[in-house]
Amino acid sequence: MDIFERLRAILGDAHVRTGADMAGFDRDWTGRYAFTPLAVLRPADTQQVAAIMRLAHETRVPVVPFGGNTGLMGGTVAEGALAISLERMNRIRDIRPAARIAVVEAGVVLSQLHDAAEAQGLVFPLTFGARQSARIGGVLGTNAGGSNVVRYGNTRALCLGLEVVLPDGRILDMMSQLMKDNSGYDLRDLFIGAEGTLGIVTAAVLRLAPRPLAYATAMVAVPSLDDALALLNALQEGTGGAVEAFEYMPRDYIDAHLAHDPKARRPFDADHDHTIMVEVGATAARDAMPGPDGAVPVVARLEEMLAAMIKEGRVLDANVARSEAQRREIWARREAAGELTVAGGPGIITDVSVPLDRVAEFLRRAYADVTARDPQARFMTVSHLGDGNVHLTI
């Protein structure tokens, strides 16, 4: 019996794809990486993943796990390997509102978990542009961050427990539901961010948080990146640490967005070199319920703080969203980053983290060094400035 027959015996004929049936699993989302897997496998449960891994280990065949295939760095290249798609393992096993945890399988789509948590008045706070297709296994494998790290931390901070299939097919059950667990080595964190190189994540226990009752969202222009950091610190102090997103979109990003989307509008009447998207989330009713004048306290507080900073010269201009439609327009500008990166043509895509107070220096040096080597180089930058993560595309 050859390896394909043995795989079909494990999964059934319909879930072992070869040849033309592997379409969609033969390139990454950007289209820059094309490859031909040996086969695409679609297990239904952890036991089937374990059986695949035992067979691959026995026959020394390489394996590459697939989540939503939304990465930009070629992490799913599976040339001559078994591509294991966890798309069928898509059950939300349990949501426990009182404990604020969700027990999910690795194939759950991020937006699916968002919807399930919201139905319980909670939120799974990891969010980014690919949330409609990214899967939990992938965000764990990459220790994904997104736009809300500044308040909630990245994926590692949101995970309590894991179930992992090791390379030889053994199943490692680390599905702890404990908020505090000081019992020995933290093996869980070895697998988060390992991109499947140590084992395949098949399930997880994730932390949920109270869903904000109201948001205050704005585009803010500042004189410099140093002023942006001062703005972040002032907003954190003035809102009790309620800043959920603090995203940097400089002039090159705004120009790229306007060129790419004919419906896009400039965030301000005048152009600015440094613009920030800020969002504050209010979980307390006192900050979210409109007053007699119709004003939402968290929005009024943000407006008050920005107005004072404009008077002091620390902020050049600000537009605060007055409706959910305006808030969505602001977010759409930021979440277009993936499309803009691909639309820009061949380039060097980077994903760099630096200390918050070194972001300005990093960008100055990067622009200067690259320009010295290639005066024709073009740049597009967007940053989760609240946590020091910079996406610089050259």
Image: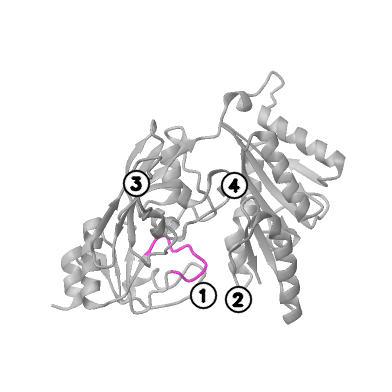
Direction from residue 41 to residue 285 in the image, left or right? right
Q: Which residue is mark 4?
A: 150
User: Which one is in front in this view, the residue at disc 2 or the one at disc 4?
Assistant: 4
Q: Is residue 272 above or below residue 367?
A: above
Q: Between marks 1 and 2, how big is the CA–CA gap?
A: 8 Å
Mark 4 or 1, nearer chain start: 1
Residue type (three-letter) at the residue carrying disc 3: Ser
| Numbered circles on residues, count | 4
Q: Which residue is mark 2?
A: 346
Point out the stretch of residues depicted in magenta: 66-75
Q: Between marks 3 and 4, how big is the CA–CA gap?
A: 28 Å
Which residue is found at the position 61% from the left and 27% from the top?
A: 288
Which numbered marker is on residue 32? 1
Front residue of 77 and 362: 362
Front residue of 153 and 287: 153
Residue 18: image location, x then y, percent: 29, 74
Q: Is residue 46 visible to the viewer in this orientation of the structure?
A: yes
Residue 72 in magenta? yes
Direction from residue 94 to residue 340 in the image, left or right? right
